[in-house]
Amino acid sequence: MDALSLETLPLSYINQYAYCPRRFWYMYVQAEMIENAHVARGIAHHERAHSEGYNATASGAIARRSVYVYSAALGISGICDVVEEEDDGTLTPVEYKQGQRGRWGNDHAQLCAQALCLEDMTGRPVRRGYIFYFGDRRREEVDFTPELRAATTAFVTAMRRAVALDVIPPHTEQRARCKGCSLYDVCLPDESKHLAGAN
């Protein structure tokens, strides 16, 4: 194994890569992070969610906050906002997100990565999780289907490849993803497209 294959990737970056590989590159490889209003609200919400401890849910499950998870098989690690454990040992990760549910599926990939870590750590199957969106006060159930698991694993592989190639990924063709991106002024997608067309 080479050094890259041994490097543990933060599982939160799966969300960034699934949303936009170029955004992942700027954040992970070049350590670019610009805090806009959306990012600041998200940080504040996560600070509350990441206070360590546990409590019982309405269903009687134990809800542990700020749980460190890892997968040696995938080489990823990170923090689950909440992991609920039922009396029968069933584990359910819960992720808190600023804003409303998006249409890109990147939040699902991050949550699925948490499930894969929990499975690797405990040997127990994790079939579903939840994402709570502060923007619409909604808790969405996410089933960890074979397709979502495969996509999440593929994202991890692609992240490693992107870092190994040491070449910045191209701009996304789906420009709607650029709207509100905190790294827009670093990435300059419209300006880069204009310059590419001029050459």
Image: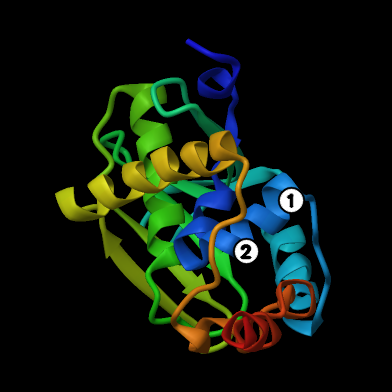
The outermost residue toward the front is 199
Asked whether 72 or 179 is in front, the reply is 179
Can I make out residue 48 in this image? yes
**Residue 192 picture quarter:** bottom right
Q: Secondary structure at mark 2?
A: helix
Residues packed near mark 2 inside 10 Å, few (<14), some (14 to 19) or many (20 plus): many
Residue 17 versus residue 141 in the image, above or below: above
Of the two numbered discs 2 and 1 in the rendering, the one whose residue sits closer to the viewer: 2
> Residue 35, percent across and down?
83, 72
Distance from disc 2 to disc 1, alpha carbons, whole Å, reads: 28 Å
Residue in the image at 51% along x and 57% along y: 17
Q: What label sits on residue 51 in the rendered view?
A: 1
**Residue 71 picture quarter:** top left
Q: Amino acid at mark 1?
A: Ser
The residue that mark 2 highlights is 23
Residue in the image at 70% along x and 45% along y: 29
* Placement of the C terminus among the 4 image quadrants: bottom right
Q: Secondary structure at mark 1?
A: loop
Asked whether 61 or 35 is in front, the reply is 35
Residues packed near mark 1 inside 10 Å, few (<14), some (14 to 19) or many (20 plus): some
Residue 146 versus residue 19 in the image, above or below: above
The outermost residue toward the left is 146
Q: Amino acid at mark 2?
A: Arg
> Residue 176, percent across and down?
50, 89
> Residue 108, percent across and down?
38, 62
Which sits earlier in the primary sequence, circle 2 or circle 1? 2
- Asked whether, in this view, residue 41 is left or right of residue 83, the answer is right
- Asked whether, in this view, residue 112 is left or right of residue 35, the answer is left
- Asked whether, in this view, residue 114 is left or right of residue 198, the answer is left
Can I make out residue 78 in this image? no
Residue in the image at 78% along x and 69% along y: 44
